[in-house]
Every structure is written in C-alpha cells, then in structure tokens.
C-alpha cells in the first residue's frame, strides 16, 4: 500500500513539473511573454556611441546598357499602392527571431533589409546592444521609422519590431533596379519616367562609356539647374508638405528643401548604377546657425565621397551651380557640416584629394589653384577665351579679395562684363565667374 502511495506521489510530482514546463513555454517554440513594451518613432536620432564600421559594399559601376523606358499601364491604379499588412508586436514569435550581440552584424542586417526595401523586421538583442545603440544604428535607413520594443521574460534580451517607410527616391530607384514597378504609385511612376527620359537624353548608350565622375557631375548639374530651393515652412500653395521633402516635389514642382535635393540625387545616382546614401545631420546657414540638413555620400572609383547638392545650388541668377561641395572629404565638409557618428556608416574619404573634384583630369574647367599668381594667370586666360561662359576656381589654402580681382580686370582692360560669386569652405575659397551678354 505504501509503495503504491509513493508511486502516486511520484506521478503527481511529474505531472506538476510537466505543467510548469508547458506554462513557461520551455517545451514548445512559442512566444515568451513580453513586458514593458512601448512604441517609438525616429527619423533616426543617433547617440554619440561610435560603432565599428561595416565591411565596405562592393563597387557597383554604372551600367553600360542603355536605359530602358517604362510607360505606366493606362488601367486605373491606386494613388498609393496598398501596403502589406504589418504584424502586431505582441504577435511576433521572438523566440525564433535572429538574435544579435554584435553591432557590426546588426548593421549588416539593416543594410540587407534596406537593399530589399523590407517594410518590417523583428530583432532580438542581447544586453551587449542597448536600445540607444539600436536606434542609432537605424541611421542607415532612408525614410521614417516606427518601432515598438520590450524585454523578454526570463532573459535580458531586448525585442524590437521596426516598421520602415522609405523615401520616394529610394522606392523609385529600387523599383527600377528590380523592375517591380507595381510597388510605385502613379506619381512615382511619372517621376521615374522623367528621370529616365533625362538620363537617355544625355547621350543614350554613349553616356555609359564616360568616366563615372562625368556621369555623376551631370546628375549634380541637372539638379542644380532644374530645382530651386523651397523652405517648406513658407508653403502657402496648398501642395502636400511631404512633396517638398522628396524627389517627387523636386521633379514635379521643380522645388524642394534639402531633403528633396538629397532624395533626387540619391534616386538619379542609384538609377545610373552608383551606390549612394543620404546623411541626416546639421549644417551652418548663411547666418552661421546650425540647422537640420541632409546631403549625400556616393561611391565613385572605389571611394566614398561627400556631395551636398543643396549647398552647390547657388540659386542666384545668372549663376546656377558651384562645386565647393562636390565630391569632398570628411575633413573638409566638417567645416560647416556635422552629424552623429552613427550616420557615417560608410568609409568616407578622410582627407582632401585632387582626384575627384577640382584638379581632376576629367574636369579641366574646375581649376585648383595653389598660389595667387597662378590664379591670376588662369583667370586672365579664362576671361580671354571666346568659348568660356562660366569658370570655376578653387583657391587651396589662400584667399583673394573682390577688390584684388577688380584691379586685375582693370589692368586687363575688362572693367565689366563679368559677374562673380564666391564660397568659403574651411581654409579654401571657391570662385565662380559668369560672362554677361
């Protein structure tokens, strides 16, 4: 009798253990309870933590194949494609989600998601990666981000569900590359066709035989010539505010703020075959005040370079463009630009070089000057050339005044007929001259 009673007690104890295991989810691959989950939204606002740079992506040279055109179907299309239904945070099986303990691996996962235009991703992070680290690393994404997070019961792991909304320029370039045109709204398709028509008009197949730097310069110049800066805070035309912050406003209305410039540059560069990203940070305005700003970094000739098309658009008729911010290095642009360390997730050229902008053999009209005498000689030669319409000079490490240049022109018998404008960036001066009719 006692032996049977002992067996019953053993079976009861085993049943209790099994029930506990079932309740804690240790026998089944099911989501563990999440506590303290909250939502958030970033566009992203990185912290000051410096992650290790990821391995540079392989070079993508511009295609040598003529660009195909795409004409939208005449059948009715929705104004905005219907998005895929998003999974709710509490329904995600975080037990089976990839777990990350390295910021490098997490960054690579972000870049992979961006390359595929992934709309929603779940992450599980061990305690080596904080929420601040995570949100800072989101700087790799083009567009706005919403996220929800919480901690997993029974562990210190942080669980995060992120929803991404990419900029139109990013979406359009992705659709062109993958030929998934059905993901685009009508307005985005029209922008794509406009971009393709312009790229083809540059010279069709012959364009792609040019040096990548020349193709990039054409993109830079096209934006400077065709888009005028428009501060969305002064919007009184009734146009959707978002349009002035994207490639849609830049192409449809020929106006936009710095985000529109950067989105348009990114779109054209990616369609042309370049790797190109957007940096969100701050820059000094004409009053020396730090303001929110966006610009680009682009991969050309095995090198990541900075390009700020907004600041190169002189927007002062008859001047159209300068090149002070065309393909410059990190050290130079830091003179009036700044950003959180996480926003610099590419190995951008660290010091000045003459191979990518002024002084480059591809651009003989962009002259790098190293002394006042050489500047005076080259300026006189440019002003005397019958074919010269515009002339650009970079004065490397020295400066001249407007009064000096006016005295030179009087010595040359040229008191008028030219307009000039200059920019200063760090220790260098940039001068643009325009001949008048």
Image: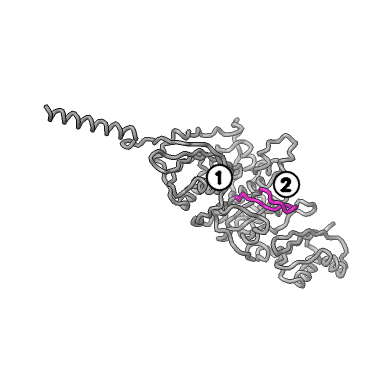
Residue 5's spot in the image, x, y percent? Answer: 15, 28
Residue 348's spot in the image, x, y percent? Answer: 58, 58
Marker count (numbered): 2
Between disc 2 and disc 1, whose residue precedes?
Answer: 1
Residue 319 visible to an observer of this rendering: yes
What residue does disc 1 label?
A: 174
Q: Are marks 2 and 1 in contact (CB under 8 Å)?
A: no
Q: Secondary structure at mark 1?
A: helix
Relative placement, left or right, of 403 versus 15 is right
Residue 120: mark in rendering: none
Which residue is at a point 62% across and 43% down the rendered structure image? 192
* Range shown magenta: 278-292
Q: Is residue 279 above or below residue 92?
A: below
Image quarter hosting the C terminus: bottom right
The foreground one among 277 and 128 is 128
Q: What kind of secondary structure does the magenta stretch mostly adopt?
A: strand
Residue 139's spot in the image, x, y percent? Answer: 56, 48
What residue does disc 2 label?
A: 229
Q: Is residue 399 above or below residue 106?
A: below
Relative placement, left or right, of 276 versus 112 is right
Q: Secondary structure at mark 2?
A: strand
Label 2: few (<14), some or many (≥20) within 10 Å? many
Q: Is residue 240 above or below residue 408?
A: above
Which residue is at a point 48% across and 47% down the rendered structure image? 130
Q: Is residue 282 magenta?
A: yes
Which residue is at a point 72% across and 40% down the rendered structure image? 233
């Amino acid at each position: 009798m006692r032996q049977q009673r002992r067996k019953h007690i053993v079976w009861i104890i085993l049943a209790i253990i099994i029930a506990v295991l079932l309740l804690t989810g240790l026998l089944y691959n099911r989501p563990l309870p999440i506590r303290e989950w909250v939502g958030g939204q970033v566009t992203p606002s990185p912290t000051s933590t410096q992650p290790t740079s990821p391995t540079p992506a392989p070079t993508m040279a511009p295609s040598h194949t003529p660009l195909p055109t795409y004409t939208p179907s005449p059948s009715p299309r929705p104004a905005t494609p219907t998005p895929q239904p998003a999974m709710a945070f509490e329904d995600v099986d975080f037990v089976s989600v990839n777990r990350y303990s390295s910021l490098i691996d997490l960054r690579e996962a972000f870049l992979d998601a961006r390359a595929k235009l992934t709309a929603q991703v779940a992450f599980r992070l061990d305690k080596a990666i904080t929420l601040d680290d995570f949100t800072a690393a989101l700087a790799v994404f083009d567009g706005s981000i919403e996220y929800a997070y919480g901690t997993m019961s029974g562990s210190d792991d942080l669980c995060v569900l992120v929803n991404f909304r990419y900029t139109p320029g990013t979406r359009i370039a992705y659709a062109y590359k993958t030929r998934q045109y059905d993901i685009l709204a009508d307005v985005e398709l029209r922008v794509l066709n406009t971009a393709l028509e312009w790229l083809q008009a540059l010279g069709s197949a012959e364009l792609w035989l040019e040096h990548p730097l020349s193709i990039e310069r054409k993109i830079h110049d096209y934006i400077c010539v065709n888009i005028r800066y428009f501060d969305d805070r002064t919007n009184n035309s009734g146009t959707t505010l978002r349009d002035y912050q994207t490639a849609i406003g830049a192409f449809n209305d020929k106006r936009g703020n710095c985000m529109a410039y950067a989105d348009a540059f990114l779109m054209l560069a990616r369609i042309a075959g370049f790797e190109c990203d957007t940096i969100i940070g701050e820059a000094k305005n004409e009053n020396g005040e730090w303001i929110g700003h966006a610009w680009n970094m682009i991969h050309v000739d095995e090198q990541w370079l900075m390009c700020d098309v907004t600041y190169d658009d002189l927007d002062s008729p008859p001047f159209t463009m300068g090149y002070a911010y065309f393909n410059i290095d990190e050290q130079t642009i830091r003179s009036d630009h700044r950003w959180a360390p996480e926003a610099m997730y590419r190995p951008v050229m660290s010091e000045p070089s003459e191979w990518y902008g002024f002084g480059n053999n591809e651009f003989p009209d962009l002259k790098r000057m190293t002394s006042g005498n050489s500047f005076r000689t080259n300026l006189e030669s440019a002003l005397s050339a019958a074919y010269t319409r515009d002339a650009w000079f970079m004065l490397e490490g020295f400066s001249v005044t407007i009064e000096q240049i006016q005295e030179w022109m009087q010595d040359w018998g040229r008191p008028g007929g030219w307009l000039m404008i200059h920019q200063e960036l760090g220790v260098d001066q940039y001068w643009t001259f325009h001949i008048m009719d």
